[in-house]
Amino acid sequence: MSWDIIVENLGFYAQGAKLTVLLTVASLAISFVLAMPLALGRNSHNPFLRNAIALYTLVFRGTPLLVQLFLIYYGLAQFDLVRESLLWPWLSSALVCVILTFVLNTTAYTTEIFAGSLRHLPVGEIEAARAYGMSPFTRARRILLPAMLTRSLTLYGNETVMMLHATSLASTVTLLEVTGVARNIALNYYIMFE
């Protein structure tokens, strides 16, 4: 047993853990902000808006996250239009591509979680807000969003855990988060058990 190698590399583990937390928190924070209006649109009476959001969530929930990551990180570089655009300095960064992929994926899941909880609100609450004369914005701010968040808290907690687990995919595109660091140290020193 070579625990001294683990102790010598604690700094690398700390850097990996820092990147893991950054990827998780950034992805979840951005997707939370994006998913709230998308959830309202997913339950909209406008069929074009509702179906466009449904298509987005279907595509990103129906394909593996690793495939999405490879398409964004490796696939976008294939197009001259992307490489010559103003976005290329950001899209050529592995960190930006990973966060973009994670945000697109977790926003799709979070949108469906929030939209499902909105569909299960009691009709009486919404009718009471309409009868009181609340505008749609006020109704969303005071009634829909707070009720939606309280009803979807446990499912959103599951999505948070899944996003934390998904950060291990970042090591496939040159970012060494905590599991990537552990894998590299185990392979370099042949210390699988430790």
Image: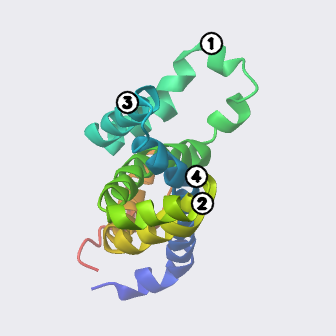
Task: Choose the circle earlier in sequence order: 4 or 3.
Answer: 3
Kindly report which numbered mark, 3 or 1, lies closer to the viewer in this rendering.
3
Instruction: Name the residue beneath numbered marker 1.
Output: 80
**C-alpha gap between disc 1 and disc 4:** 44 Å
Kindly report which numbered mark, 2 or 3, lies closer to the viewer in this rendering.
2
- Asked whether residue 187 appears in the rendered view, the answer is no
Q: Residue at x 58, y 56 (%)?
A: 33
Name the secondary structure under disc 4.
helix
**C-alpha gap between disc 1 and disc 2:** 50 Å
Q: Amino acid at mark 2?
A: Met
Name the secondary structure under disc 3.
helix
Circles 4 and 3 in contact, beta carbons < 8 Å: no
Instruction: Name the residue beneath numbered marker 2.
Output: 134
User: From the viewer's perspective, is 117 left or right of 132?
Assistant: left
**C-alpha gap between disc 3 and disc 1:** 31 Å
Name the secondary structure under disc 2.
loop
Q: Amino acid at mark 1?
A: Asp
Q: Quadrant of the N terminus?
A: bottom left
When asked about the image quadrant of residue 25, the answer is: bottom right
- Asked whether residue 147 appears in the rendered view, the answer is yes
Instruction: Name the residue beneath numbered marker 4.
Output: 136
Identify whether 54 is placed above or below 79. Answer: below
